[in-house]
Amino acid sequence: MRLSHGEGHRGGNRHQGGEAAAGQKAPASQRLRDIWPDIRDLILPRRLLLAAGFSLMLVNRIAGLVLPASTKFLIDDVIGARRVDLLTPLIGAVALATLVQGISSFALTQLLSKSAQRLISELRRKVQAHVGRLALPFYDANKSGNLVSRIMSDVEGVRNLIGTGLVEFAGGLLTAVFALVMLLRISPLLTVMALVIVCGFAAVLARAFRTIRPIFRERGKINAEVTGRLTESLGGVRVVKGYHAESRESEVFAGGVERLLANVLKSLTAMSTMGVAATLLMGVVGTLVMYVGALQIFAGTLTLGGFVTFTAFLAFLVAPVFQVVGIGTQLTEAIAGLERTREILNEQPEDRDPLRTIALDEVRGEVEFIDAGFSYEAGKPVLNGISFRAAPGTVTALVGSSGSGKSTIIGLIAAFYRPNDGRVLIDGTDLARVRLDTYRTRLGVVLQETFLFDGTIRENVAFSKPFATEAEILEACRIACVSEFAEKFEKGYDTVVGERGVKLSGGQRQRVSIARAILADPRILILDEATSSLDSESEALIQQGLAHLMRGRTTFVIAHRLSTIRRASQILVIEGGRIAEQGAHETLMAAHGRYFELYTRQHGLESNLFLAPGEGDAVADDSASNARAAQGGGGLGEAMRIIRGG
């Protein structure tokens, strides 16, 4: 499916996933013209298959006309003329035609239905691969359940474009043409009368489909929203149960289901209304044909056999109208799903950004921010005027209160986002112009939110380097102290960790994540509170592994325990999206500024955290006491905030 448009987005702006376009809907004809290239791209590679399908359909329809056509011959020439000798050949011809019709129907279904299912699988793979290459802001603006629905459900309807739906639709129209020719030969008057009524109904039907199509489009959106909420609820089941919120989640889901039900009922009402109209049409046409046909028989201008045959062929003329109601709805649903799929495919993948043309042969690890600014939403800056340089092989620590912008800086370094102002340089090259496949392969990331896939410990560690040897995997596990717990399991490194690593403790998940980064052997390493889930014993065990991992690499660290970053080459104190202080630990402590305040408060709190009120006052060091005195009673709340989210 082609990408007809979809310019690159600035990293700071939230993607709307194509939904914004839905607010200003183009006319139906314009939407059909927009989507036609996609339909054509689906059909052209399968034109031979569709040609074979149409050929089988043609044979099928012609064979299906033999039975009604033989009725006049049977009544007028066999029964009326008492020609018994013609009965056997007539029955043989009808039986043969019925056999051909059955075989062609079977072949048609096998040929096109299986091809349609292969197409659905192909489209799912294509959409999933495309979604996986989209920039992180797109995921910030779209629920995961919504995207699952886009990938799995929206492509289902295309089977009606490439499968039997389109061919059956065309077959019905072709049968109607054949029937019209036969009807005109039998009785032009009856044919014109019936045709006028059928054409009038067709006009009403076309208008009805313009009403039904938005209903099906809305159903896809509602289904995606309900799926998204359900996915969130199931993923956060421990939080739901922890707050005894099962009933509230049930109510939220029930509300979504009710919206979906209302949409389905609305579409069923529209469909049943069209069905009633089609039934009334058949009744009106049948009554009119019966009355006029009887008069023509009395007048001698129409034989009894001709009347019976006319009635049979009339069904073939009106039947496609009923088929249009069913198949047309399927095609409408398919086009609506294709439109939603197209919205996703029109999003610009981050690796196809036309600005990213520079390939890095080797990454030394020099990172420099030059007056960088960033905002997730227009008019709400998160970073302002960030400037610093990290030399290759050095360690830069980011400290500050929650929401100050530390993780956003990390996101810019990882090229998850692009600065709105200023530049981020990698080895002197603007990161916004660097091809991501030559940069991120030299990047190692251990995020605050540890994520493990539902696989084995070995598979999760090897995720960063799929073709790593067993020795390399085991060495990474040894350095990260994964071996300490993995080898105690019955299946060792083949132990399945469960969805999101639920079968491991928080500390164990973090160690697997660190082993994954060690195996990647990156030039630039990002540790976003990498030891936040570790107890004191586990952290002590892993510090040596981290020291090994950080040696010779440019490392960026966010740590909530400030005592762990005293040896950093430089420390950036981030406050309100700006660098408030910058320097080494000793320099910042000597300056008695914001870092000194944060460090001494946290040190005092950690010393007295489990003592009764007033019990630790006598043993608090002078610097901590001075900091507390300067801040009054608010120091404890601030220190707790630093420990939990700093």
Image (cartoon, rainbow, N blue to C red):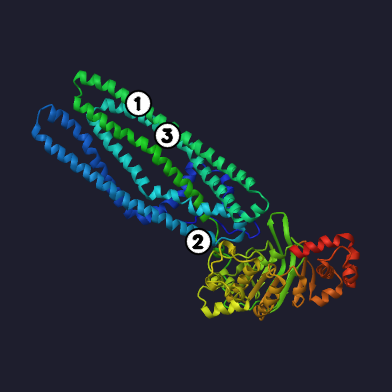
Contact flag, marks 1 and 2 (Cβ < 8 Å) = no
- Say left or right for 303 vs 50: left
- Whether 493 is drawn above or below 213: the answer is below
Q: Which residue is mark 2?
A: 129
Residue drawn at x 52%, y 77% as measured from the top left: 468
Mark earlier in primary sequence (3, 1): 3
Nearest to the observer: residue 352 or residue 152: 152
Mark 2 → mark 3, Cα distance in angstroms: 39 Å
- Give residue 137's position: percent from left, percent from top: 62, 58
Nearest to the observer: residue 370 or residue 444: 444
Residue drawn at x 25%, y 34% as measured from the top left: 181
Contact flag, marks 3 and 1 (Cβ < 8 Å) = no
Marks 2, 3: nearer the viewer: 2
- Whether 172 is drawn above or below 41: the answer is above
Q: Which residue is mark 3?
A: 205
Circle 3: residue type:
Leu
- Give residue 49's position: percent from left, percent from top: 32, 54
Q: Classify 10 Å Cα crowding around label 2: few (below 14), some (14-19), many (20 and above).
A: few
- Say left or right for 400 vs 141: right
Q: Which mark is residue 623?
A: none
Mark 1 → mark 2, Cα distance in angstroms: 52 Å
Q: Which residue is mark 1?
A: 283
On the image, which quarter does residue 283 sit in? top left
Circle 2: residue type:
Ala
User: Label 1's element?
Assistant: helix
Residue drawn at x 54%, y 64% as measured from the top left: 454
Mark earlier in primary sequence (1, 2): 2
- Say left or right for 590 vs 57: right
Mark 3 → mark 1, Cα distance in angstroms: 17 Å
Circle 1: residue type:
Gly
